[in-house]
Image: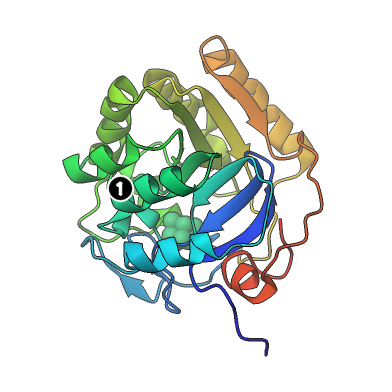
Amino acid sequence: MEQPKYKYIYGPVSSWRLGRSLGIDPISSFQKTCTFDCVYCQSGRTEVFSDRREVYVPTEALIHELNSLPEVSVDYVTFAGHGEPTLAKNLGGMIRAVKMIRKEKVAVITNSSLIDRKDVVEDLLLADLVEAKLDASSSESFKVINRPMPEILWEDMVGGLKTFRKVFKGYLALQVMFMASNKACAAAIAQIAHQITPNEVEINTPLRACAVKPLSIEEIEEITAIFRGVCGAESKVRNVYEVKREKIQPFCQPSTERRRGKENS
Ligand code: SF4
């Protein structure tokens, strides 16, 4: 197998939400490290559960990779990867480093589990766009879909999202993954989204290879209509089936496949 030239950076990949996105994996561990074990995770089961922030990738090492990139034109530099990005204690330092070196906007894709913590909020405030997950309308459905560590409480996470919205001046996108097990919660999740008031709600369903079947276009359209009815006046609402994606050739295939699977989608 071809050895990855880049250990921490991957892509560019085509994202239905972010356009052309250059990925940075601030965890970059071969074992998936996360606070959740979502039933639909494309990376399989969580191997390392942790809610402790640590330095996984030294900022200097990331700077070295950023400076050795080929010329690449992208819309966003995005922190996301094989695990939860906010577990990186030096996330703020890495965002600052990217902003010194690259001209593009910076996005962070988070599962929202640590968004009630002050140090995490301070780091996320440095981003231009934060895409935050909310798949459940109650503590019970949270445990079924996201299978969090016992320390992570749904109520704290929702409270953290509401507080974050008040202080974050950038673009907040709420991503909701729908499948058969939470389809009936659509109206309740839409009500919570309405209280959070993100700039955008992204309705998704697991289209990449994983253990869960995606919902059909018709089912996702029904859910989208519910969200537009409840929070469409304040938040843009989009769904994964509505957006066309461009085919992009990553500059480093092995590092990209590790984070995104074979189908670069
Ligand atoms: S939060 Fe993301 S990385 Fe963690 S288990 Fe869920 S889908 Fe996988």
Question: Residue at point 30% right, 51% down?
Answer: 93
Relative height, residue 57 to residue 167 (above, below): below
Is 85 on the left or on the right of 255, as rendered?
left
Q: Is residue 179 left or right of residue 248?
A: left
Dot 1, how many residues are within 10 Å of its Cα: few (below 14), some (14-19), or many (20+)?
Answer: many
| Disc 1: which residue | 92
* Residue 66 x %, y %: 50, 60
Position of 227 relative to 217 (above/below): above
Find residue 200 and report its horizontal and vertical position in percent: 54, 25
Which residue is pictured at 42% across the width and 78% down the height?
31
Q: Is mark 1 within 8 Å of ligand 1?
A: no
Depicted 230 relative to depicted 85: above or below:
above
Query: Is residue 214 visible in this depiction of the protein?
Result: no
Q: Secondary structure at mark 1?
A: helix
Q: Is residue 134 visible?
A: yes
Q: Give the residue displayed 43% in from the left and 41% down from the top.
A: 136
- Three-letter amino acid code of the residue under disc 1: Gly
